[in-house]
Image (spheres, rainbow, N blue to C red):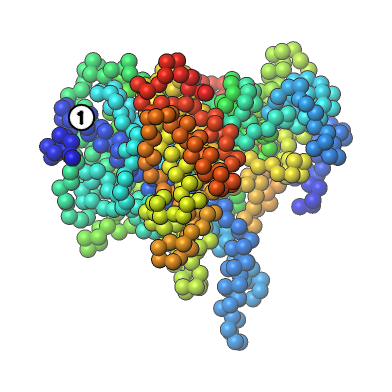
Amino acid sequence: MSKDQNSNGCSTPSSHGCGTPSTPVNPQTDVLVPKELHACMGLNACKGHDRFGTNDCAGMGYCATQKHVCHTLNNCRGQGGCGLYGDAAEQCKPGENECAFQGSCATPIQAERISTMGANTGKSVWLLARDLFETRMENAKRNVGPSPMENGPPEQWLKSLDGGYDSCGNSGDKYCTFGFNNPAETANEMIERSRESLKETVEKCACTKDDK
Amino acid sequence: MLSTFLASKPNEVTPSNIGEALQQAIEIEIATIPVYLSTYYSINRTPDQSAIEAKLKAALLAKNTGTAQAYTEQQAEEKAKDLSAQIMVFANKAGASILSVVIEEMLHMSLSSNVKQALVGKPELVNKGPNVWPAYLAGHEPQFPINRAKLSQDQLYTFLQIESPAKLEGQYKNANALPYTTIGDFYDMIQGCIEKHFSDASCYDTSRPQLVPKMGYYAQNDIDTLYYDKAHNPKFENAEDSGDLVHVVDQQSALAALQEIVEQGEGHEGGHKFKVVDGVDCVDCSPFTEGSFDDKDRSELAHFDKFNELWCEMQKMEEEYKTLFGDSVDPKSFYVFDFEDNVMTADYPDIIQKVSTLTNAVYSYLYVMTQACYYAEKNTQYEIFMFGIHKSMMWILGSLCGILPSMKYIDSKGFERSAAPTFENYAFNTASSPKAQIIALFNEAAAVYPGVAYLKDRIHDLPNVPLEPYLAKPAQPILA
């Protein structure tokens, strides 16, 4: 795989259908004080609410405005990344946890992350989070622009941006190969499978009762 | 001194001793946890594949002697890649499999506690782990030693003895506890007593708090109970329908709680068992049958069968390496830390002792918090469990157990070893809260070993749970 490709098998991030984003050359110095704390790319509620304050519209934010390492380590409502840890009900609502420490997993949510419980098991967490976000915005009568990357931020891209992205867990890198698969193809297959069944997943998730 | 219960040499569960029998069940479950956890943390689930590959390639090429060329450069490379992938998959699978059992053992501890809470009250969980190692499961006949030890076929064999659905070969010693031949038999005795004597709903006190289902306390799967196959596809060790907590409110729910423990541990009738050859229990590596699974969809193996599978895969790998390399390459050296069996904190040099003591205190606090849940109302219970037990297990205990193997020491025989988590009971005193004592131990450990300093916020965020409910100060906040 060439160096400028991301893990979904697409080429550079700008090829994901939203023109050329204003990716900062030096993210360390360009990060602003956030106006809203949200869990990932494409999940911001307003213009100028992404990590760099440059997005034009809801849902077009380039990056998470908060970052925490994993399950139970988030500080606020809506910051849970989800997938990886938590029960079926929690994993059905990525980015929509009710309270501090209830976040099911780390943010930002990399494109390769899968859920480990519930209707979304083995499928993309970010696609589900984005769908739930769009529904939330629709209910609030808000227009939502396309996400800078249609599948969420790939792990390799996050690593290149922050220089050390590490999602949680002891079972190893989600974007990986033992020499017998192409990790980009593996990720793409998972994402496409997730997209095909997303409607059904959302319907099943809606039926996952949270008795807490 | 033996309790009245044990001194009476009981041999059946009766309405008068069912409380003690259920406490014995709780302590059997607790005794298995350090055994499984010590083995789990001996596994490097994600070793450096390129380093393994390079070593294996060199070992294969070293077989080329004189004019006899066993492997070309390319053949050696391909074989090394294949063997290294096998290690990557097995190490991760062994970790996922053992951890999936640990989670269910903790679930079993809580299921037994729920039954005890409903029938007689006061499940006791604090400081109930074995103090002496090797340890023995209370009442098991025949007795066999259980060890805190690294992953090996011997250790997996011990796991199989613990979870065996069939009676073990060997002589009975007339144990000083309610005797049984398999854990399933033990729960059968309790179930028999409940069926006979506890059919009336008034026997069950539902006002006492229990750990109830659908709260996510023991989620069946997470990222740590999956592993990746050779093509890096995720494989889940547990099935979602394999069982949750059961709120014990009547005879039916009490029996369901106990039946779940047996099915998760031993599987259904017709599953794998030891094969007895000349009076010895031997591992049977024949294919799995319908009875090997513990869930409706037949996608989760029972504990016995999971360990059976690991043992057989390990055996196959050992044989393959023996054929290829003789005694010169031990596959375990690539993914198992060289822990000393049953090591104690006192065996370590001072700096490791500080980290090990902190680890033991955090481990023991898990039981303090779980026991506190049996005295707490629903929301407090949820806060203790999610922000205390989950956080401690994953982000404090897990981190400390990951740090310890990187700390080296010389054992009594002069060999360099990796420090192992010892999972000893830490006796909190009543002069201050357990959390205050953990913070003090953390400060001591961080002062001599800065590698643990990053855990400060996580430790300070722990819920403040008293050692005993009566020690709580008025209106003491849990999340303080």
Q: Is residue B326 above or below residue B429?
A: below
For the question of whether residue A46 can be seen, the reply is yes
Which residue is labeled 1 in the image? B18
**In this picture, is B293 found above or below B406?**
above
Q: Secondary structure at mark 1?
A: helix
Instruction: Mark 1: give few (<14), some (14-19) or many (20+) Cα within 10 Å.
Output: some
Among the 4 quarters of the image, the one containing residue B154: bottom left
- Residue at x 24% of width, y 23% of height: B120
Q: Position of residue B341 (x, y in %)?
A: 38, 56
- Of residue A119 and residue B44, the one placed in the foreground of this image is B44
In the rendered picture of this protein, how many numbered marks are placed on residues? 1
Q: Chain of mark 1?
A: B
- Which quarter of the figure has residue A52? top right
**Is B246 positioned to the left or the right of B192 in the image?**
right
- Residue A161 lies in what quarter of the image? top right
Residue depicted at 73% across the width and 29% down the height: A65
Above or below B3: residue B343: below
Look at label 1 and name its amino acid.
Answer: Ile
Which residue lies at the image location 41% right of the left edge and 58% below the top edge? B340
Residue name at image x 40 percent, y 51 percent: B346
